[in-house]
Image (tube, rainbow, N blue to C red):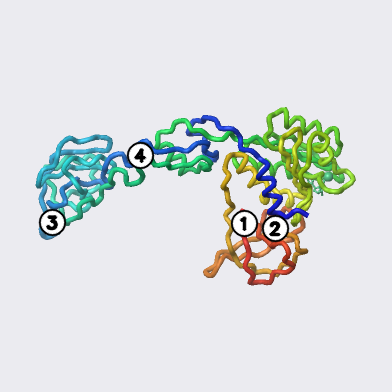
Amino acid sequence: MLSVTDARQRLFDALVPTEPELKPLHDVAGLVLAADVAANEDSPRFANSSMDGFAVRAADLAGASKAQPAALKVVADIPAGIVSQVALQEGQAARIMTGAAMPPGADAVIPVEDTDVPAPYTDAPLPSEVKVIRSLESGAYVRPRGEDFAAGDVLLNAGTHLRPQEVAMLALLGQADVSVHRRARVAILSSGDELVPVDRPLKPGTIRDTNSYALSSLVAGAGADVIPLGIAPDDLETIKAHLDRAVEQGADLILSSAGVSVGAFDYLREAVLSQGELDFWRVNMRPGKPLAFGRYRNIPFIGLPGNPVSCFVGFEVFVRHALHKLMGDLNWQRLVVRGVLDDQVKSDGRESYLRGVTQVKADATHVKLTGHQGSGNLYSLVQADCLFVVPAGVNDMAPGSDVDIWPL
Ligand code: AMP
Ligand code: MG
């Protein structure tokens, strides 16, 4: 049977990123850059003060101390946003605010706290003289031009997932519109005669559809748009009709849950095969062995297992990675924490994903099982703050074993 690693790779390789589009900067967080972005200017653009204080010539302050302050004549006032043309001569200073451009002739800034001027000094008149109580090095409290990066530097590469810090950088670079991969559209379908939406009464033998809601939150959280397809009953033609709606609404990916196992009423595989192909439909893992991947009318299709925990784990193990590729991020890697297992864990040798709760201790991050690990038991997933991995081929993990932890 196909290993988790091979299945994930096949899925990843089969998906193609959405096409680039130009989007306003306020709308690109969570999306992926479609083109490199280079600096067209140095940053900072001009040498500026990193403190509120006085721009000075460091040489004028040699030997200054509390006992013997250096007295400087204040010849200019430079708020942020203003460029002063007054060049400092020997023995002169200019009052300067944080972020303001250094005046000609100055090579350092003395913070207001190191002068006889009382701070804070909002609205204070410009003093004619300032006494400085210490010396400093040339360049002190000056942010030189180009300290952060230089014009021409490629700062962000195509394929970069835009976090808030990259959005800020794009603003710094004056990119009002940004070339990003279009948000992927993911259709979500639940299947099963027993399923009831959250706002409808339950009849005997029926259960709530939870997978639609879990998958919608996961997909939206990954930055993609959701096309909700609702619940299809266990009927081949109706399932096909639901899948057709996904195609008509322009889905880039169809995610379904349940109906891909070997049960008498599992029609999803048949529905997909009627209008497409299946690459695989089982993966050697636990929970969630029934996991299908193929195409329906040429739209990539992933059939997740029906059990709520298997469905969730299937998303984390396969779909999250695939969604990153679909949104243009080819290099995404999950952050895995290496920790220590506190419980005894048995496995049947399949690669297993168990629900755990972590505790950060002085020596390491420790992990314990949460509640009953049955694949239908949502509460033990709610109690978990991680999944941890029992590798393929391992039947027994003793307390104290090293373990890979996937924070949730
Ligand atoms: P199946 O793959 O159809 O055999 O479903 C496996 C198990 O998952 C059954 O117990 C189903 O009732 C349950 N199940 C399937 N779909 C959902 C869903 N959308 N929400 C909650 N449980 C589900
Ligand atoms: Mg079913």
Distance from disc 2 to disc 3, alpha carbons, whole Å, reads 66 Å
Q: Earlier in the sequence, mark 1 or mark 4?
A: 4
**Picture coordinates of residue 207 (x, y %)?**
81, 45
Q: Circle 1 is placed at which residue position?
A: 406
In the picture as drawn, the residue positioned furthest to the top comes out as 248
Q: Circle 2 is placed at which residue position?
A: 353
Q: Earlier in the sequence, mark 1 or mark 3?
A: 3
- Which amino acid type corresponds to the residue marked 4 in the rendered image? Ala
Q: Circle 3 is placed at which residue position?
A: 62
Would residue 115 be visible to someone looking at this image? Answer: yes
Q: Circle 4 is placed at which residue position?
A: 151
**Picture coordinates of residue 146 (x, y %)?**
32, 44
Query: Residue 250's image quarter?
Result: top right
Question: What residue appears at the point 46 percent right and 42 percent down from the top-left corner?
Answer: 156
Which mark is drawn over residue 84? none
Decide which of 89, 157 is in the foreground and name it: 157
- Mark 1 vs mark 4: give the one in front: 4
- Mark 2 vs mark 4: give the one in front: 4
SS of the residue at dot 4? loop
Distance from disc 2 to disc 4, alpha carbons, whole Å, reads 48 Å
